[in-house]
Amino acid sequence: MTVARNTLALRRRSLNTQPQYASASRTQAHTTTVCMHAPRRVRRAAHELRDVRLVQSSTATTTSTTNITVTEPPESNTRDERSRTRLVAGVVGGGPGGLAVACALAKRGYDVRVYEALSQPPPPDSKEWGNPERSYQLGIGARGQNALTELGAWDAVLANCQPALGRLSFDDEGNSVATLRRDKLYTTQVLQRDRLQSALLSHVRDVHGSCVNVKFGVECTGVEARSDKRTAITLRDAEGIESTILCDLVIGADGAASAVRSYLAENGVKSRRYVDDNKLVYKTLALRNITGRFATTTKVTMPDGSTEPSDEKVRFDETNWGGRSKSGITFDALPTSDGHMICVVLFKPDDERLAKMEPTAEAARNFFKDLFPFLLPYMEDADLERFAQKSPKNLPSFSYTYPKLHHGNVALLGDAIHAVKPYFGQGVNSAFEDVVILSKALAMATARVNARTSTEAMDDVTVDTPDSVLEGLDEYSRERAKDAESLVKVSRSFDRPGKLGTFLFVFPLILDTICNKLFGPALCEKSSIAILSDMKYSYSEGAARKRRDRFVQGAIFAAILSFVLFVARGVFSFVRAAIGS
C-alpha cells in the first residue's frame, strides 16, 4: 500500500504541474522532466514503481528458467481471447464525467456500457448550437484541460470552445474595460455544457466505438452486488421496459442526486448535504451582436498581481462579462464559439422585481435599463420576452461523499462526490480530474496484483482483473475522498450569507495578496480561490496549505502587535517618568 500511495503522489506531481496542451507527446515529455526534478519523496515513489515492474519482469524470467512446470493455456484462451472476454464496466450517467470515464476505461481494455437518462444532444457541429440558450456555459481550466489531454480527448473538445482571455466590465456610460490575465499559465476555454457532452460523445464513438456503447433515455433503477464479484445494474428505458446487466465495475457519474450513491448508502458510504443558507436562483438570456466589437481600454494583470495598461485590442467575444447592482443582483456572461454570449442573472428567490416580472419584453427591458443599461445594445425583444417568461432555476447545494467513495466494485465520481456552486469553475474540471485519478489507481493496482501473481511478459499483464479492480477502487477512494471534502468545504466558505459573509470572503483575499507580496509564496501562498485552480496542489493539499498560511499570518501579526505594545509601553513609561521628575 505504501507503493500505491507514493506512486499516486508521483502521479499527482507529474499531473499537477504547468500543463502542456499542444499535443500528447509534449505532455509526456513534460511529465518526464518533472519526475527528474521532483522532490526526494516523489523520486523515491518513482523508484518503487520501477521495483514493481522489475518484480514483474523477474517473475516472468524465473518461471521460464526453473524446473517448475507451467501449464500454458490453450491458444484460444490467450491474450486475443481475453480481449473478447474483457471486463464489463457499467457507467451510470452519460454527461461529461460519464463519457470521460468511458474514454479512460476503454483505453484500459474494458467493454464499456454507458447509460444516460436524458436525451442525446445534437452533434457538436449542429446549427442548433447557434441558439445561445440551448445550454448553460462551462469554463474548462487547467485541471480539466490537463485531464482531457491525458484521456486523449482534449483536441475534440477544444475544437468547439471559445477562449476567455480575461474579464470585461462596463461603466455607467457604457465604456468597457478588458482586464487580461497574464498571471495564469493557461487560457480558460468556454463552451455549452451539452456541447461538451456532444463533443465527448463524438470522440468516444469515433475513437472507442468498438468497445463503448452509449445509450440515452435509460435510467438506473437499482444496483445489487452478487456473490461472483460482479454487480447487477437494473435499467429502465423510455418505454418502461426493464433490463439487467452484470458488470465487473460500476461507475456512478449520475450527478448530485445519484441513484448509485443511494445504493452505496446502505454499505457505509455517507453524504453530507449542506442547507443552502445563501440561496440564489438564476435566469439566462442571450446577448447578441457582439462580433467585431472591441473593449474601450485594456489592462493586464501581471504574474506579481500588479495591473498595467495595455494597447492590446481585445474583442468582446474573447472575454467573460460581469457586474453587480447595488441591490445585490449580479450577472455573468460567457462567450460561445458562434459569436454570442450567454448571460446568467443571479438573484435572491424573493426579489420582487424578477419574481413578479410581467411576462413581456418591455418589462425585461425596463429591468435591465435600471440595473445594467450597458447590456441593452446586445439584447433583442424575443430574447427579453423569453427571459421575462422563464421560471427561475436553482443552483446546486453543496454536498460531498465520505468517508469513502466506493463499495466493492462500485465507485462514484463527479457531482456524486462533490457538488459545488459554479462560481469558481471547479465542477466539471474536478470531475475530469476524478477520472484521471481513478484510471491511475486502477493501473497501479493492476501492476501490483500482476507483480504478485503474473508469469507473463510485462506487455501482457496490463489487463485489469476483478481483484485489481477492488484494490484500485480502494486506492482511488482513499486518494480522492479527502479532496472531495476539501473542495466542497473551501468553496462553501466563499458563499456565506450577509455582510459578515462578504467580509469573510473579501478580507482573506486582501490579506493573502498583501502577505504574498511581502513574504513570498514560501511563507504565504496566493489566495484560496487561486489555489483551487493551481495544479501544484490537490484540493486537500491546497486547503492544508492555507491553514498553515493562516497560522503563519497569525504568528506574524501577533509578533508585530507584541512589538508595538512593547514600544508603546516603553514610551508610556518614559513619558510618565519624565512628567514625575
Image (cartoon, grey):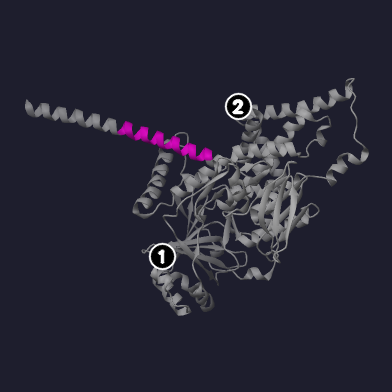
**Residue 137, image x and y in percent?**
57, 61
Local crowd size for mark 2, using a 10 Å CA cut-off: few (<14), some (14–19), many (≥20):
few
**Residue 186, image x and y in percent?**
58, 49
What is the magenta segment's predominant secondary structure?
helix
User: Magenta segment range?
Assistant: 540-560
Pointer 1: what residue? Answer: 171
Q: Observer-nearest residue: 128 or 439?
A: 439
Q: Is residue 211 toward the left or the right of residue 279 in the image?
A: right
Q: Amino acid at mark 1?
A: Asp
Q: Secondary structure at mark 2?
A: helix
Pointer 2: what residue? Answer: 40
Residue 570 occupies which quadrant of the picture? top left
Q: Observer-nearest residue: 432 or 482?
A: 482
Q: Amino acid at mark 2?
A: Arg
Q: What residue is rendered at 81% in x and 25% in y?
A: 59
Q: What residue is rendered at 64% in x and 42% in y?
A: 407
Local crowd size for mark 1, using a 10 Å CA cut-off: few (<14), some (14–19), many (≥20):
few
